[in-house]
Image (cartoon, coloured by chain):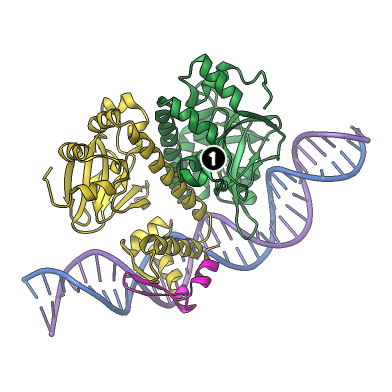
Chain colours: A green, B yellow, C blue, D purple
Amino acid sequence: MAKNSIMNDEDLRKIHFFSEFDDDELKKVRSVSNFKTLAKGEMVFFETEPYIGFYIVLKGCIKIFKISKDGREHILHFIYPFDSFAEVPLFEKYEKVSKDEFSYPANAMALENDTKVLLLRSQTFYSLLEKNRSMSLKIISGFAKKLRHLNKHIESLTQDIPKRLARFILEEKKQKFKDGREHFELRMSKHDLASYLGTIDETLSRSLKKFQDDKIITVSGKKITILNKQLLQDSAT
Amino acid sequence: MAKNSIMNDEDLRKIHFFSEFDDDELKKVRSVSNFKTLAKGEMVFFETEPYIGFYIVLKGCIKIFKISKDGREHILHFIYPFDSFAEVPLFEKYEKVSKDEFSYPANAMALENDTKVLLLRSQTFYSLLEKNRSMSLKIISGFAKKLRHLNKHIESLTQDIPKRLARFILEEKKQKFKDGREHFELRMSKHDLASYLGTIDETLSRSLKKFQDDKIITVSGKKITILNKQLLQDSAT
DNA sequence: TCTCCTTTTTGACTTAAGTCAAACCATCTT
DNA sequence: AAGATGGTTTGACTTAAGTCAAAAAGGAGA
């Protein structure tokens, strides 16, 4: 809602969907989107809520999760800046989305203080899409990226926990720096990481310890340093 | 390549991408696509092969799988008639696809004799897409459907094996008949089902036995009959 | 710096699922 | 019908990962 300094043209163009928009079009986006700042632990939406549109993360980190009947939380995705989430329903049953008959497919919560998101309402987005046919190719490629990522995650979930952890660390390292440094900060709690890897705190803790004992990584708080990339890669397969 | 009776307009229109094509456009599709018939166990492609285009299943069943370093097979998807597979690379790195630098992301094998598939080469498809802007919305909705399915699968993989099995049976039942019957035929071997569920033959066999002992289902060869849907649903959550 | 509170780790134990070996069973072939 | 073959099941055993309880380590605020 608020026009904030974080919503400048430069940042908006980092959003894949809008990367080819001109200044006027970006102005349009700014005027029709709602801007929200969230504290750590605050919910973006619950899966019971009626679907009103999708979100884009501008700053911070969001987790998308489900709660199973026994009360356990299962994290499906972490979303980082300039990626969108909850866009899938937009393209499933057009009529239902228009008629407010859709709910969100999962829960979404901010993981850091001062997490900033942009809400694009369904109707707003449909009309943007109509005027910008080029956007549909962007959407396709965004979806393709997500599909590839989910396929990897599925592949990973059939491996044992140390392998999943090794893959996760390598993937994070790759994302976080193209530069040479071999350490990075986890953006989520160990609990959330355990849940994403499909395990529990204790098992994650033991796997991390094992990697440290084997001199493959060091862990200090949220900081992970890769000591021996070769061994880590071996552990991942 | 062969123009076969199975490739009539009616069938082609069942393919989501082409559902709004007129007769002339379908004729075009027929003339540019390659038609293949495969025996059970025959490969459509290996993941080492250069990417040349994507496929649509017209008849039979295809499994998409990876082989891990220890030689175990992990099935990511089963593809049934009128669904496409291996379209994701088309939308990832346009330049690379054009330059033949892409490989298939996994392996694909026919699970039944007389499985029929259609190959659409990358270049062919790009030019179809250019002329039919309406196709991009179809692609998006196809991807959305896949994303939803993968999310469900991921959710499932964090549950124990009996729960995964129960979910799979309920999902298959839903897909296979909107009518009232409570039995259906598995299209894949028990071995392949085990691999898809992220487990092994023995564990699947024991889970099926347990459900039978509990009078929830009966299994006779590939035929599964649901005796008590309520109990099956309870087992799934 | 000292609390209080949350997050993470550790230890002892249980359980689900994987391994290995063998038996069983249904086709299909000759 | 006998044999061969691949798919499936069974039993005995091992191992990875989950559970529960408690201790240790970190942080935020007084």
Q: Magenta stretch: residue B233 in it?
A: yes
Q: Position of residue B135 (x, y in %)?
A: 33, 36
Q: Is residue A24 visible from the viewing direction of this image? A: yes
Q: Residue at x 38, y 67 (%)?
A: B179
Q: Is residue B100 left or right of residue A105?
A: left
Q: Residue at x 36, y 32 (%)?
A: B91
Q: Tell me the residue that label 1 is attached to.
A: A86
Chain name for mark 1: A
Q: Residue at x 49, y 41 (%)?
A: A88
User: If the image is split into quadrants, where does the C terminus of chain B sit?
Assistant: bottom right
| Residue closest to the eye, A173 or A115 | A115
The amino acid type, in three-letter code, at marker 1 is Ala
Q: Position of residue A52 (x, y in %)?
A: 58, 40
Q: Which residues are magenta?
A: B210-235
Q: Magenta stretch: residue A23 in it?
A: no
Name which quarter of the figure residue B225 lies in. bottom left
